[in-house]
Image (cartoon, rainbow, N blue to C red):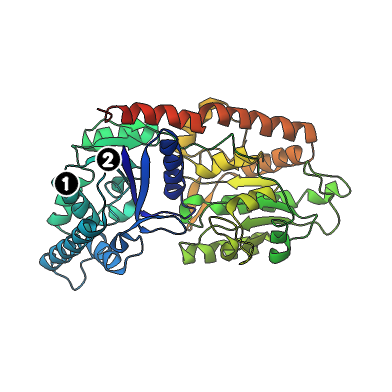
Amino acid sequence: MKIGLLHFRVGETDGVSLEMRKWKITLEKQGHQVHFIAGTLGKEEGIKVPLLAYEEPRNLEIRERAFQSLSDWSKERLKQEIDTLAEEIYNDLKEKMEEFDIVVVNNIFSLAHNLSAAIALNRYFKEKNIKVIGHHHDFYWEREYYSNPTSEYVEEILENIMPPRDIKHVVINSIAQESIKEFKGVDSVIVPNVFDFEAHLWEIDSYNTKILEKTGIKENDIVFLQATRVVRRKAIELAIDTLSELQKDIKKYIGKEIYTGKKITENSRIILLMPGLDEEPSYKELLIEHAKEKQVNTIFCNELLEEIRDEEKGTFSLWDFYAISDFITYPSVLEGFGNQLLEGIFAKKPILVYEYPVYEKDIKLSGLEIVSLGNKAKKINGKYEVEKEVIEKCSKEILEILFDNNKAKKVVEKNFEIGKKFYSYETLDLILKSIFSIYND
């Protein structure tokens, strides 16, 4: 079959882009023709429909008026702007789209980020009689931003095509499956995030060690990697709090080696390395101030990160950052599933995790061994906090793993085998064969 994978963007390091690439690889191995369709393509090949871009200016203005405040627009003006942009997107689709047997629409029918795109796509697919699967990673009804539509027309769009009820639905966890059933009355299939556990393991090499030089990290500094985007729900302040506690005891280990072979010296520092995309500048400023207050060394270096390393440009892949790190921090309070968790497992690094709802409900049962920040964070003055005793416990457990080679190896190998068993490409292959078999007439 000829299958389209459609989203606002592909070729980036956000979770949806990463999962789309995994679907493409798996479906192509099954013998299908697979093409990306997106507003921006990064370094990927595909069909580019610019008006679908995540940062498309006209849509961002419409979104603001549709969900925050009409401001100087009337409800009639808002409807006109939504419909005009939808018509332009529809015409762009007619001009650029190829014939597909089925198109998998990622998030456009569930997040409400671009109402016009949802209208245009729904119309186009119906007129062309193209089968559609809605791959829903996020829902608008779970985001505060979308909780107060400013007009009846916006409410109508949300009700009727967010998502359309007459398509097949895929979600990424059991909480989402229950949520879409409750809010929209539709059934869905769970397809968890996966990783290629058969791939070549990421290793330190002569190129990715240059990350240390470019960021000022010394060879005996302990590197904690926060591989996520820099957004509030990642609760990175919890990682800062933990590393602040860790620093109180690290001097006791001078002369000793951590499991990666680094010898702790008087000048060894604890570093929180953050190569992820900064999508909330005000949050980044909050983190800078918080780290300064807690005396934690933080390094933001998104300018060094690309999807694929480029030695001529001096940029690195996310996998390079994993290779040169000693520990992974993953304190997110909300995740659709947890791509960076799987990456950390594959990288064979120990991981600090806040037990976000999907972890607690779906992933924890697999038996992963992590350093847990618990599940009782509170937001105080714009920052997430957990009890001091929890931070102290995490610091102690991290030190035990860092300075015990046998324990570190046991933890990372156990987690790797669990990941391979439950979250591999083989798992994805079986699920996608089941989903797409109904279309193989």
> Which mark is on residue 102?
2
Residue type (three-letter) at the residue carrying disc 1: Lys
Quadrant in which residue 40 is drawn: bottom left
In the picture of the structure, the residue carrying the numbered disc 1 is 128
Image coordinates of residue 408 in percent, x first then y, are 73, 35
Q: Residue at x 55, y 26 (%)?
A: 421
Image coordinates of residue 134 in percent, x first then y, are 29, 41
Quadrant in which residue 84 is drawn: bottom left
In front here: 326 or 204? 204
Image height check: is 14 above or below 191? below
Left or right for 149, reference 223: left
The mark nearer the N terminus, 1 or 2, is 2
Residue type (three-letter) at the residue carrying disc 2: Ile
> Which mark is on residue 424?
none
Q: Residue at x 36, y 64 (%)?
A: 55
Tag 2 secondary structure: strand
Q: CA distance from mark 1 to mark 2?
A: 11 Å
Quadrant in which residue 176 is drawn: top left
